[in-house]
Amino acid sequence: MSAQYSLTPELRRKLKEPIGTLIRGSFSETMKRFKDVMGKENLPYIISVGDTVSKNLAKNNVHPRLAIVDNRVMRRNIQPIPLTVDKTTRVKNAPGTITREAVEAIQEAIKSKHRFKIVVEGEEDLLTLIAVLYAPENSLVVYGQPHEGIVVVKVTREKKAEVAGILKAMENVRKTK
């Protein structure tokens, strides 16, 4: 599957910074604070991106409507995480890219009334951007920030515009002659 978006060196540096609110701390501390955020919000949708954050949400009785995982943590293979879902989809998404296949799977999952797990062959990190772009407003997209905690992105019109700008900078332009 060909890449629809590719990461540039400039964007790689920029995206090392959280695109949402960083909640620092141990797994138990970050989950407690995340539950506090959830309690204050009327959330239509929660999306988790990453194996560790998805596992920790599930352990804390928070079941995202969409979990995007790659069965890897810190570039090491792990046992698949047992998650409560209705449907599992598999996609290919090479590191540093976002494929059309992955975008379509996220769009389908968000439109569905079912709980979805998308298992990525490759890397899921950049799919956070697609999740933010297509999630309903007021949703939360949660991903891990290695060695620091979790990042919570509240989906707003402004956040969608910010992500659209990042994706525009990543867009692969195919010239035809």
Image (cartoon, helix red, strand yellow):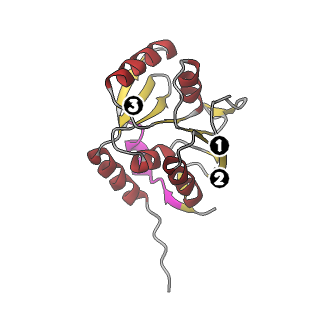
Horizontally, residue 46 falls left or right of residue 164, namely right
Residue 114 against residue 39 in the figure, above or below: below
Horizontally, residue 160 falls left or right of residue 122, namely left
Q: Nearer the viewer, mark 1 or mark 3?
A: 1
> Of the numbered discs in the image, which one, if any, rests on residue 152?
3
> Of the numbered discs in the image, which one, if any, rests on residue 87?
1
45 vs 158, nearest the viewer = 45
Q: Residue at x 28, y 47 (%)?
A: 157
**Badge 3, how many Cα within 10 Å: few under 14, some, many 20+?**
many
Residue 122 against residue 76 in the figure, above or below: below
Point out the stretch of residues depicted in magenta: 4-17
Q: Which residue is mark 2?
A: 92
Residue 17, image x and y in percent? 38, 36
Q: Residue furthest left?
A: 158
The total number of labels drawn is: 3
Residue 103, image x and y in percent? 52, 55
Spatial distance from mark 1 to mark 2, Cα to Cα? 17 Å
Q: Is residue 14 magenta?
A: yes
14 vs 28, nearest the viewer = 28
- Whichever of callouts 1 and 3 sits on the residue coming sooner in the sequence is 1
Q: Are marks 1 and 3 in contact (CB under 8 Å)?
A: no
Q: Amino acid at mark 3?
A: Val
